[in-house]
Amino acid sequence: MRPFGMNSFAGKRLLALVRGEDYAHAGEEEAIDRVFENLPKRSGQWLLDVGCGRGGTANYVRRGGWGRVVGIDRDGDSLAYARSRYPEVVFAAGDVCEVRRLVSQRFALVYMFNAFYAFEAQREALAALRQVAEEGAGLRIFDYLDRGGLRHNPLIVNGRRIIPHPIERESISGTLEATGWKLVSAEDLHQEYGRWYASLLSRIEARASEIVAVGGEEALDQLRAVYRGILSKIEQGLLGGVLLSSVAVDPC
Ligand SMILES: C[S@@+](CC[C@H](N)C(=O)[O-])C[C@H]1O[C@@H](n2cnc3c(N)ncnc32)[C@H](O)[C@@H]1O
């Protein structure tokens, strides 16, 4: 198998194998429960899962009773898989910046799990998402945080920057405000990210032979390089995790 991006269909399929479910984010169900713990469950409301990948998170949220869920992602192959595996979730294929064209609903909650860091146009994405949000809607961004050194010392594997656009503490509040979102809280998850990635690495080793059977030795080497690299950046204090909670306001 040639080197692949962790956000590609092949990358997410291997991650699902290691994680045992259709998740490509740190902490799997523990992380979802953490993000949703104080959010109201209302069967009539619509929730938007942005960068939903293979759809496992969207389906977990739907099954948990938080509401009806739409997932969007620009990876058409993963969405085709998600549609067939989770027919009770609505899926739409396309770029987040095109979300207004992709969905007809208005959302009480917009959320993302390890997707925002991959957006090349984060400001445009937030502005587009504001347009499909109800008045007073919530926004939850669960993602990587640059703790102050990653920009100058990025993680690169096989020539690819692994976490291209982590959240930056100094600028995120202003970016949210300019696009119609008010930051309410930012909860650090550095310790949890360390624990979750250490656990993921153990699971990669435990399933090494299955990974090789699916993707060959190169796939195993690549998974090890990416996730050892992420854990090392976390342990050096350069990288961490954060949960941002925001509400929709009028853009300034
Ligand atoms: C690390 S995966 C996380 C997937 C999912 N949230 C989960 O937790 O399993 C990031 C996802 O973001 C999607 N993505 C990246 N950039 C995007 C964009 N501009 N518009 C829509 N989706 C995007 C990728 O295709 C990928 O499926």
Image (spheres, helix red, strand yellow):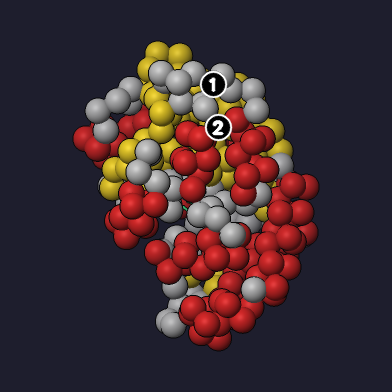
Considering only vertical position in the picture, is 16 above or below 26?
below
SS for dot 2: loop
- Can see residue 238? no
SS for dot 1: loop
In terms of image quadrants, where is residue 17?
Answer: bottom right
Answer left or right for 30 relative to 180.
Answer: right
Answer left or right for 77 relative to 169.
Answer: left
Q: Mark 2 points at which residue?
A: 64
**Of residues 134 and 234, which is closer to you in this image?**
134
Kindly identify which numbered label has been placed on residue 41: 1
Label 1 close to label 2 by CB (< 8 Å)? yes
**In percent of the image, x 61 and y 33: which residue is there?**
35
Name the amino acid type tagged 2.
Gly
**Of residues 228 and 61, which is closer to you in this image?**
61
In the image, residue 63 lies at what x, y percent? 51, 35
Considering only vertical position in the picture, is 139 above or below 5?
above
Q: Does the residue labelled 1 lie within 8 Å of ligand 1?
A: no
In terms of image quadrants, where is residue 124?
Answer: top left
**In percent of the image, x 73 and y 60: which residue is there?**
199
Q: How crowded is mark 1: few (under 14 residues within 10 Å), some or many (20 or more)?
A: some
In the rendered image, the quadrant that contains the N terminus is bottom left
**Of residues 102 and 251, which is closer to you in this image?**
102
Q: Residues within 10 Å of mark 2 (few under 14, many from 20)?
A: few
